[in-house]
Image: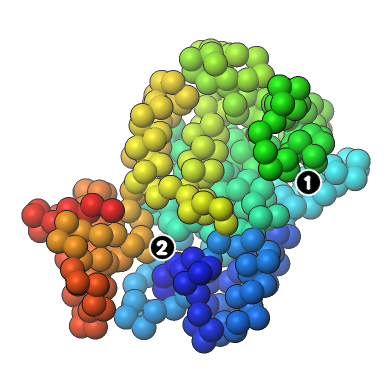
């Protein structure tokens, strides 16, 4: 399997992963053969690309932090909660609670998966898929901080609902393509406060989860919003969600930009540690995420191009690479893997 951007998709390619609508339902399932019509529709819906099968890579296993079903159910539940709030109903969190518990259980079973491929989101489905990813990353981080099950649960609920206040922000501000005016920016920033209000009065949510919504844009240097809190005034859960939110936003592919690679995003988090992110949380995050997860395409200093086939736990920045193209750009058809822990003259350059 490999990810191809929309422009590189061709008819007769076979989908290796399902593509979801913004409500979490499957639009096109694994095994579907793409047609020109399907590719056109994906473009219309704002998908950046798709995972397709590749004969030479069939034996590579892609480790997943959570199962496709759990992810899909969680996206559906976030969508439902957002929808209820939008139409002014009190929102039910039962479904979401069950999803969050599944997420925690699955990560607990598989704590060493170093976070794998980003999922593919349509323009409309971005918020829901993003909320679920932020939840997954936050739970992984929470485990690094030895949080117990109840604490993980409050963290996860806060993480999955961190941006719920955006529903209260008028759509013309939320979806405005150009830069915002000062007043519009102020209103946009108020999504933190709206989120706090929505969550703190909910009988089934902890005040700590509500604080995540309130504080997830604060920064340790006091330059965040809405209250310019300092690091010591922030809750740990909010510091965690702050990093998870930034990482997922940086790495997600959008139709108008490709998204940073995990290695680039990790560098960025390292660069902003102490400024935008609590230093300890940033460090634990960097330890927990592979810079080159299985499935990444990389170019070596020899000019050869390949796909990461496995991550070395002892040296996560030196994975095992299945070579796919030689230095001249010709497809390599025979099986050839290099282990960067053993071949020290080889380096990933891109
Ligand atoms: Fe936010």
Image coordinates for residue 170, horizontal then vertical, percent: 82, 36
Residue pointed to by mark 2: 63
Ligand 1's quadrant: top right
Give how far apart the Cα atoms at labels 2 and 1 are: 30 Å
Q: Which quadrant is home to the N terminus?
A: bottom left
Image coordinates for residue 339, horizontal then vertical, percent: 17, 62
Q: Left or right: 223 with respect to 272?
A: right
Q: Secondary structure at mark 2?
A: loop
Most foreground residue, 110 or 82? 82
Image: 164 above or below 235 = below
Image coordinates for residue 71, horizontal then vertical, percent: 60, 58
Q: Secondary structure at mark 1?
A: helix
The picture quadrant where one finds residue 57 is bottom left
Most foreground residue, 346 or 232? 346
Image coordinates for residue 148, horizontal then vertical, percent: 52, 36
Q: Which residue sits at x=47%, y=24%?
A: 276
Most foreground residue, 322 or 154? 322
Residue pointed to by mark 1: 82
Crowd around label 2: few <14 · some 14–19 · many ≥20 (10 Å): some
Residue 97 in view here: yes
Q: Left or right: 57 with respect to 247?
A: left
Q: Which residue sits at x=64%, y=74%?
A: 40
């Amino acid at each position: 399997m490999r990810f191809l951007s929309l422009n590189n998709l061709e008819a007769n390619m076979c989908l290796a992963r399902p593509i979801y609508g913004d409500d979490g339902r499957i639009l096109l399932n694994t095994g579907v053969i793409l047609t020109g019509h399907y590719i056109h529709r994906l473009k219309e819906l704002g998908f950046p690309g798709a995972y397709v099968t590749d004969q030479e890579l069939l034996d590579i296993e892609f480790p997943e932090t959570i199962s496709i079903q759990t992810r899909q159910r969680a996206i559906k539940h976030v969508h439902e909660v957002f929808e209820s709030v939008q139409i002014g109903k009190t929102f039910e969190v039962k479904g979401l609670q069950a999803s969050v518990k599944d997420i925690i259980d699955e990560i607990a079973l598989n704590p060493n998966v170093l976070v794998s491929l980003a999922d593919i989101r349509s323009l409309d489905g971005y918020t829901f898929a993003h909320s679920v990813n932020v939840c997954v990353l936050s739970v992984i981080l929470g485990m690094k901080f030895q949080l117990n099950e109840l604490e993980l649960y409050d963290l996860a609920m806060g993480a999955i609902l961190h941006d719920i206040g955006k529903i209260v922000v008028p759509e013309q501000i939320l979806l405005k393509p150009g830069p915002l005016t000062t007043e519009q920016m102020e209103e946009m920033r108020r999504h933190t406060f709206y989120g706090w209000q929505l969550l703190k009065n909910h009988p089934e949510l902890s005040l700590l989860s509500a604080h995540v919504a309130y504080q997830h844009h604060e920064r340790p240097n006091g330059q965040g919003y809405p209250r310019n809190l300092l690091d010591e005034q922030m809750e740990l859960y909010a510091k965690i969600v702050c990093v998870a939110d930034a990482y997922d936003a940086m790495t997600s592919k959008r139709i108008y930009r490709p998204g940073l690679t995990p290695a680039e995003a990790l560098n960025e988090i390292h660069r902003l540690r102490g400024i935008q992110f609590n230093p300890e949380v940033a460090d634990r995050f960097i330890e927990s995420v592979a810079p080159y997860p299985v499935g990444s395409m990389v170019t070596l200093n020899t000019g050869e191009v390949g796909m990461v086939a496995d991550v070395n736990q002892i040296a996560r920045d030196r994975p095992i690479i299945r070579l796919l193209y030689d230095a001249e750009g010709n497809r390599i058809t025979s099986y050839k893997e290099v282990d960067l822990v053993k071949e020290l003259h080889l380096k990933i350059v891109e």
